[in-house]
Image (cartoon, rainbow, N blue to C red):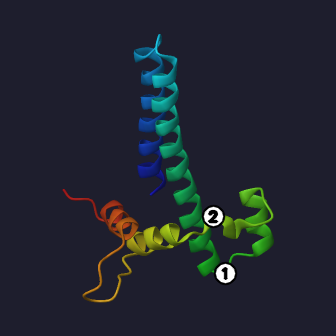
Amino acid sequence: MVHERFRHVNRDWDRALQAGRQYDGWHSEWQRLALYALTDALTYNYLAVGAIVAYLQQHGIDEDLLRRHTQGVLPDRYVTRHALDHLAGLLGSGSDLGAAEPTWTAVGRQIAHPAT
């Protein structure tokens, strides 16, 4: 999962740099496109941290250790519904039969079992 997230974040940083090169004379267009790409990168980072924190919490890792590793007093702030859905897909957990699978669960499942 970390490798896959790293690939996405690098792609988003590259998009931000390309926007700067492509729209050098168009400041407002550069701002718009660069910020879209950078917030996409932030979303992927936040999702990855949330999935890892949730996984460690499920395995009984000490909360003080998690606070130190996440460099904050509230590691739970990273554990969102999307992060939990993503973790479920990564671990192969599923939703109820007949229920629509959340998007981040499907993405996690694709990362865990890539098509060959």
Relative to residue 99, is residue 88 depicted above or below?
above
Secondary structure state at the residue bearing disc 1: loop
Q: Give the residue at x 45% y 37%.
A: 12
Residue 105 location, quadrant = bottom left
Report x, y in % for residue 16: 47, 29
Label 2, label 1: how far apart the Cα atoms are = 17 Å
The residue under label 1 is 60
Relative to residue 8, is residue 61 depicted above or below?
below
Report x, y in % for residue 20: 48, 19
In-front residue for pair 60/71: 71
Q: Which mark is residue 78?
A: 2
Horizontal relation, residue 113 to residue 58: left or right: left
Q: Which mark is residue 27?
A: none
Report x, y in % for residue 52: 57, 65
Q: Which residue extends farthest bottom?
A: 97
Q: Give the residue at x 36% y 76%.
A: 92
Secondary structure state at the residue bearing disc 2: helix
Q: Which residue extends farthest top?
A: 25
